[in-house]
Image: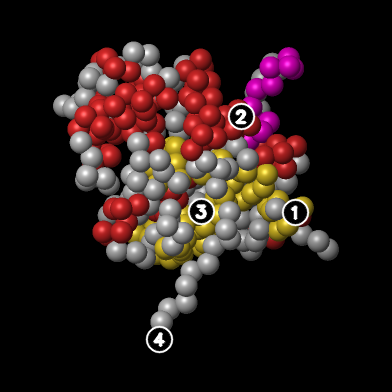
Amino acid sequence: MESQPMYLPEDVILKVENLDVKFYTYAGVVHAVSNVSFYVKEGETVALVGETGCGKSVTTRAVTRLIESPGRIEGGSALFRRRSGKVVDLLKIGDEELREIRGNEIAYVFQDPTSSLDPLYTIGYHIHETIVAHKSKISKKQTFKQAVSLLKQVLIPSPEIRVKNYPHELSGGMRQRSVIAIGLSNNPRLFIADEPTTNLDVTVQAQILDLLKSLQENYKMGLILITHNLGIVAEVANRVYVMYAGKIVEEGYLEQIFYNPSHPYTKLLLRAVPDPTKKIEKLESIHGTVPSLINPPPGCRFQPRCPFAMEKCLIKEPPLIEVENQHRSACWLLERT
C-alpha cells in the first residue's frame, strides 16, 4: 500500500507539528521541547522569542536534525517544501537526502560565528567548500568569484581582499556577515538565524538586521529568527511565537503580540523592554527563573512566576485559546465562561 503524499499549502515552506524533544541525562529526563507547532511562509520572517533555556534553539536544531546524544526527537513532523516542489518530512527522510537539504535549501547561522569557522581556512575557502558540497561541477575560479560577490552583498568592504582573510583577521561583525554569506551561498529557501546580533554593538546590530531584511527581499526566502530581544523582533518579524519552558505560550502577527498581548509572560516580557520616550526610574523584571525541565511544574509551566495564577493553573495545562484571527494564547484567563 502506497503512503499518502504529504500536503503543504502553496505559500508555506515549513510546517512543524507536535515536535517533542527530550534529553536523557543522569539527572533525569529533560523535557526540552513539548508539543511545539509552527509554520513559515515563503518570504516572511518568523521570530521565536523567550528567555534563555525556553527551547528556541533546540526547536530549530531538531527541525534540521542537529540534536545529538543524549538528546532524542521523540515525536512530531517537520514538513518542508523543496525547490522541486516535493514535500518531505525532515524528521523521517534518509541521511543522504537530509545532507542535500542542509546547507543548500536550509541554511543555519549559529549564535557564535567563530564556532562555525575553521581557523585554518580562509573565508573564501569556507564559501567554496559549501558550494562544492552541493554543486560538484563548478570550478574553483567560479566559486572564488561567487565568494567575492557574496561578501559584497553582505556589505563587507574590499571583498577581493577579505575573501583571502582567515577568521581571526576579521572583526566580530565581519565574521557574522561572513557566516551569513556562507549560508546564502546556495540560495536557500529557508534561513535560520540563531541570535545573529548577540555580542555585537548597537550600530553593527542595526546593520546586520538591515542586511537580513534586504537579503530576504532579494532571495524571497523564509527566515526564522531566534532571539530574546523584542526590539529586534519589532524591527524585522512578520509573525511571533513566544516560547516558555519548552512550549509555545502565545502566537500571532507582530502587531497582535505587541499591541494586544494576552499571555502574562508576553506582557511581562514587553514591560521589561525600556521605552526611550518615557522617563523610567526602574525597569520591570519577571521574578524567578525558567523552571527545571526535568521536573516542570504541574499545570501551566509559567504559574510559579505568574502574578495572575489561579487554582486551575496549578492543576491543568491550558491549551492554545483563540484570541482573534491567527492570534492564540495558552492561558486560562482567556477561557470563555
Callout 1: SS: loop
Callout 4: SS: loop
Name above or below for residue 130 compared with residue 42: above
Q: Residue furthest left?
A: 120
The one of 335 and 313 positioned closer to us in this rendering: 335
Quadrant (top left, top right, bottom left, bottom right) of the C terminus: bottom right
Foreground tag (2 vs 4): 4
- Amino acid bearing label 4: Met
Magenta region includes residue 12: no
- Amino acid bearing label 1: Asn
User: Mark 4 and mark 3: span between their CA atoms?
Assistant: 27 Å
Q: Are marks 2 and 1 in contact (CB under 8 Å)?
A: no
Callout 3: SS: strand
Quarter-of-image position of residue 103: top left
Name above or below for residue 52 compared with residue 74: above
Q: Which residues fall within the magenta stretch? A: 269-279
Marks 3 and 2, the one that precedes in the sequence: 3
Residue under circle 4?
A: 1
Q: Residue at x 59, y 32 (%)?
A: 236
- Amino acid bearing label 3: Ile
Residue under circle 2?
A: 235
Res. 33 visible in picture: yes
Q: Which residue is drawn at 26% across and 59% down?
A: 96
Report the disc number at residue 13. 3
